Each structure stands twice: as C-alpha cells, then as structure tokens.
Amino acid sequence: MNRYLERLTGFMGATEDYAEADVVLVGIPMDFTVSFRPGSRMGPQQIRLVSYGIEEYSVYQDKDLIDKKYYDAGDIALPFGNVTGSLERIEEVAADLLQEGKKPIFIGGEHLVTYPIVKPFADRYADLAVIHFDAHADLRTDYLGETNSHATVIRKVVDLIGGDNVYQFGIRSGTREEFAFARENTHMYVDEIFPALQKVVDKLKGRPVYVTLDIDVLDPAYAPGTGTPEPGGCTPREMFEAMRLLGQLDIVGFDLVEVAPSADLSDRTSLLAAKVIREAILSFW
C-alpha cells in the first residue's frame, strides 16, 4: 500500500484486509483551487462518518455490501498549499492501485484531483472513456491565469485522452467559450442525464470507462454542502438510477468530489454522497 496513505476512520462495512479487497476507497483532502466556498478537504472524513447512518443493503439493486470485499485505505497525506506536489502524490497513489489490480473509488476533495487520477488510467487503457457528471463544464483553459484549477479539470482530461472520449452530463453552468468548445470537441448533454445516458451506455459497452461525479450535479435542494452550488440539478433518484445503469459498463475507476461539510449543517450532502458510493460499489463491481 502506498506510503502517502493515512487511515483515521473507515467507510461502513470495509474489510480490514487490503489484500483480499477487490475495491479500495481513498480520500483526497484537497481544496486548494476552489473558486467560491472552501471546505471540500473535509469531505472524505465526513462521508465516512455518516456512512454508518445508512444501511449496507440497497433496495434499489437487491444487493448488500456484506457480500463485497472493499478496503478503506484512508486519506492521501498531501503537502498543503503545494498544488503540483499534491497532484504528483495523487497520481502515484492511483498508479499503485492500478498496478496492484484494485478497483479504486476516490473521495474528494475538489474536482482538480480527477486529472492526476485519470493520467495512469489513460496510460493503462488506450481506449479509455470518461463519463463526467457535473453542474459545471470545467472546460476552461485557466481560471484567473491558473491552469491547475477545479474549473479546468475536464479541459485537462480532454487534452489527455481527446474530447471524443469525454461524455458530460447534467452541465448547466459555464462560460460561452466552454459551451462552444464542448459543441466542437466533447459529448455534452446540457442539463440532461436521461435518456442520453442510456444511449451512451449502449455505445460504450466493451470499453474501459472512468466515472467522475461532482456532487453539485444534483440540485442544491438535495446537496447544498458543496463549494459552487448551482440550482436546477438532478434528483438523488436519478443519480441512483445512473449508478445502476453504469453497472452495464466496464468501470475501471470512480471518484465523487466537491462535498463541503462546512456548508452542510444537516449532513444531507454527505449522507447522499455515502449512499451514491454504496450504489456504485454494488453496481460497478
């Protein structure tokens, strides 16, 4: 297991045996480049804490976490304030998990963390596709002159694997330039998840797929605890259905990012995130 991982608490039902686990959860407590409300660095620990408030059984799938072997490796120890150094450590951890044959779930933290995670996946899988759920396009070339930003993460992924391999759902916020770029380069479904997702799933069967989910894709009525809430999003039921549907694909990795507990006094966002992670474990693997 990677030297940068530190474990404080664990996700409900996680095994104590890393070697026997098929799935490994990793927290990434980073929110160095957020553009509105900070606090997502506290997301991984809070999601773990509230996970014990939900059941291990999913009525949506008739499956139970008790039948799965997954390990919570803790959080990556990051050099606070050092964006470049943090991205390097995240990439190293992701590469190690791939090398050891694990199916990783990363819990953010801000959305920029997806870029260093995807890099080793792109090296491993020449035909990698990325499915992106978000309120925001995240296709800027820079934010206030900074190219490493949670607002640039998907543009960096596009530069890495090509826009034709990027599928974006639920997007309802961005600059005019971002939407123009998406029309020419990515597969963006503006303010939509269904029925477009079903068509994309049918298209991507047989290919390795990485899934990144910014919690702000959901309407802030359901997920207020996030750095840049955007009214008009999807419902939890739609997201649970999306997780079930994605189980038809070869999902090689998954991240859930941008939960900010300090903006979520009721814990509803953290609880929702924990439930989405449960559904992902049961559906994907």
Image (cartoon, helix red, strand yellow):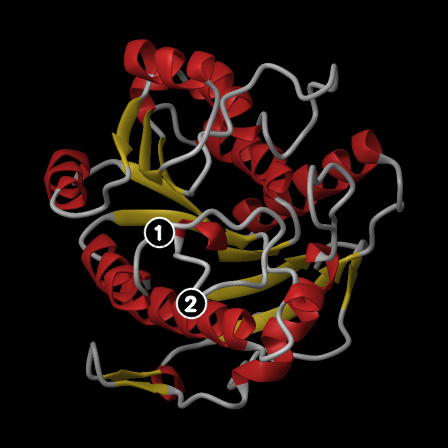
Q: Is residue 102 visible?
A: no
Residue 275, image x and y in percent? Answer: 42, 74
For image coordinates 55% across by 19% down, the residue present is 140
The image shows residue 253 at horizontal and vertical percentages of: 44, 49
How many neighbours does mark 2 have within 10 angstroms: few (below 14), some (14-19), or many (20 or more)?
some
Q: Amino acid at mark 2?
A: Tyr
Up-down relation of residue 23 to residue 254 (above or below): below
Judging by the rendered image, the residue that carries numbered circle 1 is 233
Q: Which residue is mark 2?
A: 222
- Picture quarter with the C terminus: bottom left
Element at label 2? loop
Q: Amino acid at mark 1?
A: Gly
Vertical comparison of 33 with 273: above or below: above
Residue 85 picture quarter: top right
Find numbered disc 1 in the image and state the secondary structure of the residue it sits on: loop
Label drawn at residue 190: none
Place residue 171 in its image quadrant.
top left
Quadrant of res 2: bottom right
Query: Which quarter of the figure is the N terminus placed in?
Result: bottom right
